[in-house]
Every structure is written in C-alpha cells, then in structure tokens.
Image (spheres, grey):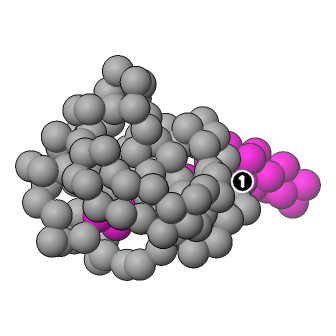
Amino acid sequence: MKANVFLLNIFIIMTKKAICITIPKTVSWETYKKELAKVEDESQIMNFKIPTYPKEVSAGDRCYIVHNGYIKGWMKIFNIVKRDSFECTTTGKNWNDGIYIQRTGKFHPLETEVPMKGFKGYKYIDEIN
C-alpha cells in the first residue's frame, strides 16, 4: 500500500498543469497565425484578457490555445499582469484595463490537434506532450 501511495505522489508531482484559452471563431486561424509570427522573435508581446489571476500557473508555464473546437498548440507564458487599457499594435483594437496573460516567443503546434469545445476565460489542463 505504501508503494502505491508513493507512486501516486510521484505521478501528481510529475503531472504539470497548464492554462488553456480560446481564440474567438470570429478571428480566423490564418489571421491569428500572423499575430503569432510577430511575437516569435520575442520583440513583441501578445496579451489575452482573463477575469481573474490564475493560481496554478505562472511565467514559464504553457498556455494552450483553442480555436474552432481544437487545441492547436501552446506558447510559454511570459507574464500574468494587471495592466491599463491599451491599443493592440497588430489589430488596432482597444482593450480595457484588466488582468492579462502575456505570451511571446515560439508557438508550438501540436502534431495532432486535440478536440476541445471553446469557452470564455481560461481553464486548467494537464500538459500535452
């Protein structure tokens, strides 16, 4: 029995949590890929507004992206911050002040996209390898 509890504890420690967000269907994946390309060299930062500070992830953890019913891939979280209102330099859209997940760097597409229904805000998932 003690061995089983020990193995379960190791599994829990090794199962890393990630955060998952949904890009609206009104934004085409081709358009979004252009935004992803602009931050790949880490000279710019993408922001995604969320309702509350996530407690189970932080800078360096994975942020998975859902679009049109599938998890497409992930990026590393650069920061999670409360920021003032701003205008997006890519789309020109004005965003209100609030809490934002910031991402920059390479987008890592999944070899096989995972079905997931879209949602508002964020949810936690286990990392996908």
Farthest right residue in view: 2
Q: Is residue 22 above or below residue 105?
A: below
Q: Is residue 122 above or below residue 3?
A: below
Q: Residue at x 31, y 75 (%)?
A: 118
Number of callouts in the render?
1
- Kind of residue at badge 1: Ile
Image quarter (top left, top right, bottom left or bottom right) of the C terminus: top left
Q: Counting other residues with Cα less than 10 Å from the Cα at mark 1, is it few (<14), some (14-19), or many (20 or more)?
A: few
Residue 17 appears left or right of 21: right
What residue is drawn where x is 51% and y is 46%? 102
Residue underneath mark 1: 12
Q: Which part of the image, by quadrant, shows the N terminus?
A: bottom right
Foreground pick, 55 / 112 = 55
Percent coordinates x, y for residue 30 in the rendering: 9, 49
Please tell me whether residue 71 is drawn above or below residue 110 in the rendered image: below
Which range is magenta?
Answer: 1-23
Q: Is residue 79 above or below residue 115?
A: above
